[in-house]
């Protein structure tokens, strides 16, 4: 555990130096910025962004893990293995962001965090949020909405992951 604490300390010190450097760079380039503008230019990635998805028939309170709005990119963090539907979820976030902010979001990144032995593994899946992902998301959304309208329950998963928080509700 001491090794992990030491490693995290090294990373946090490195990150603090990066942040300080970026703030000083922005201040030098734009000496008359107010604090809010300084933060926006120094940290273009926002985390835990709430966006209204109601224009797409989704929740009014969608929450994306992170976004780089200047570059039109959405990040989603997942624990565990890669699933096919992860890219569709990011496409849904992109559509919601576009409907609210009227700016294109064409790049997705799903970050997978897993523990392998005593180490933490981080894999990133970058992709273009193509028309295929957008239309596939909308088809899946329509399918789920029809299921709700017909008062049908989704089928119980045949192999529920051991980390599923709803496992006690659906597995008898």
Image: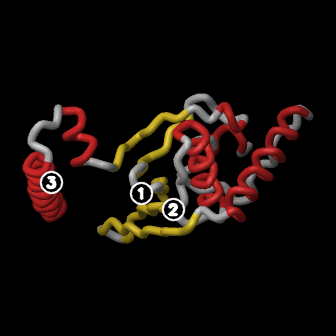
Side (left or right) of 44 relative to 23: right
Residue at image point 65% right, 57% down: 88
Q: Which residue is mark 1?
A: 71
Q: CA distance from mark 2 to mark 1?
A: 8 Å
State if disc 1 and disc 2 touch (CB < 8 Å). Answer: yes
Q: Earlier in the sequence, mark 3 or mark 1?
A: 3
Of residues 45 and 70, the one drawn nearer to the viewer in this rendering: 70
Q: Earlier in the sequence, mark 2 or mark 3?
A: 3
Asked whether residue 55 is in view, the answer is yes
Q: CA distance from mark 2 to mark 3?
A: 24 Å
Residue 135 higher or lower than 120, as above or below? above
Secondary structure type for disc 1: loop
Res. 22 mark: 3
Q: Where residue 160 sits in the image (x, y, percent)?
A: 66, 55
Asked whether residue 16 is in view, the answer is no
Q: Earlier in the sequence, mark 2 or mark 1?
A: 1
Q: Indicate the quadrant containing the C terminus: top left, top right, bottom left or bottom right.
A: top right
In the picture, residue 57 is in which quadrant? top right
Res. 38 mark: none
Secondary structure type for disc 3: helix
Q: Where residue 158 sits in the image (x, y, percent)?
A: 75, 58
Label 1 crowd (10 A; few <14 / some 14-19 / many >=20): some
Residue 145 higher or lower than 66, as above or below? above
Residue at image point 37% right, 43% down: 47
Q: CA distance from mark 3 to mark 1?
A: 17 Å
Residue 91 higher or lower than 124, as above or below? above
């Amino acid at each position: 555990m001491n090794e992990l604490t030491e490693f995290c300390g090294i990373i946090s010190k490195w990150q603090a130096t990066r942040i300080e450097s970026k703030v000083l760079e922005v201040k030098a380039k734009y000496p008359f910025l107010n604090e809010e503008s300084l933060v926006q230019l120094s940290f273009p990635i926002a985390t835990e962004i709430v966006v209204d998805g109601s224009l797409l028939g989704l929740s009014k309170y969608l929450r994306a893990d992170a976004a780089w709005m200047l570059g039109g990119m959405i990040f989603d963090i997942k624990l565990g293995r890669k699933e096919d539907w992860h890219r569709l979820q990011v496409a849904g976030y992109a559509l919601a962001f576009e409907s609210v902010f009227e700016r294109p979001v064409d790049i997705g990144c799903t970050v997978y965090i897993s523990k392998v032995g005593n180490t933490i593994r981080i894999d990133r899946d970058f992709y273009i949020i193509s028309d295929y992902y957008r239309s596939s998301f909308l088809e899946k959304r329509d399918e789920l909405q029809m299921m709700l309208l017909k008062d049908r329950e989704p089928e119980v998963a045949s192999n529920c992951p051991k980390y599923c928080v709803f496992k006690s509700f659906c597995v008898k």
